[in-house]
Amino acid sequence: MDPVAHWERVYSTKPSNEVSWFQARPTRSLEFLGDVNGGAERRIIDVGGGDSSFADEVVEHRLGSITVLDLSASALARAKARLGTRASEVDWIEGDVTRTRLGVDAYDVWHDRAVFHFLTSPDDRARYVATAAEAVRPSGTLIVATFAADGPTRCSGLDVARYDEAGLAREFDSSFILVRGLGDVHRTPSGAEQRFTYVVLRRR
């Protein structure tokens, strides 16, 4: 299965507010971001940000400079269209996080709300962690959310990996230290509940 083709189909056939991960406002992510020092000087990357409103919030409230990375050109195009002239305030990268070099110590904050749980291969997870460890500066922050241990087993037709707080932190413990974690419940546009695990990690 070609992941790029898969996500292009998803974003080409479903409106933004009908995909299961849609949030009108990414409240939990913004809560965690608010705990990170730096304000408007922070360098943030939103991994798998696609058509998420996270970048909109960062731009609107001057929460930092932001880069959005996503596999899907269609998702990025939607976000750019929604932001209009303010899209120029975002750095956009079309690519696979497990195969994209992002630079050394390039970011203060790494945010990923729902990419890591799609990495069911240990090799892909290892590449993801290595990329994050290179791209996030020492003492920088990693915010990652996945389906919880009792969350969905599939999403958008794909198998997913599920984690509790300890298990998710363990995936990153070669380069990151757990600062905080919690469980959360996301309600999809159709009204279903999905259980998530969030962790905040600090780069060693």
Image (cartoon, rainbow, N blue to C red):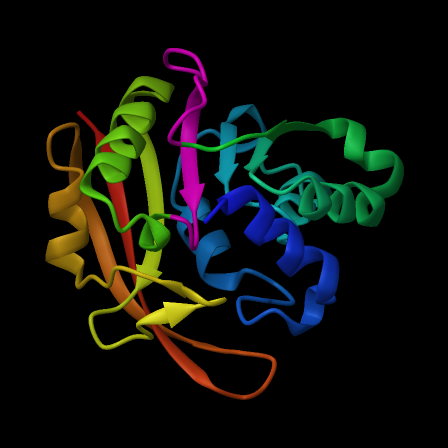
Of 86 and 18, the residue lying toward us: 18
Of 102 and 1, the residue lying toward us: 1
Q: Is residue 3 above or below residue 157?
A: above
Q: Is residue 120 above or below residue 41?
A: below
Position of residue 116 in the picture relative to residue 42 (left or right): left
Residue 152 place in picture, x, y as percent: 33, 75
Task: Name which residue lies at 23% across and 77% down.
Answer: 150
Task: Name which residue lies at 80% across and 44% down.
Answer: 83
Residue 64 can be seen, yes or no: no
Of 184 and 129, the residue lying toward us: 129
Numbered-mark total: 0
Position of residue 57 in the picture relative to residue 204 (left or right): right
Splitting the image into 4 quarters, where does residue 94 fall?
A: top right
Looking at the rendering, the stretch of residues picked out in magenta corresponds to 98-115
Residue 46 can be seen, yes or no: yes
Splitting the image into 4 quarters, where does residue 69 fall?
A: top right
Q: Is residue 114 above or below residue 164?
A: above
The answer to if 197 sits in the magenta stretch is no
Name the outermost residue toward the front: 1
Splitting the image into 4 quarters, where does residue 11 fall?
A: bottom right
Task: Name which residue lies at 26% across and 68% down.
Answer: 148
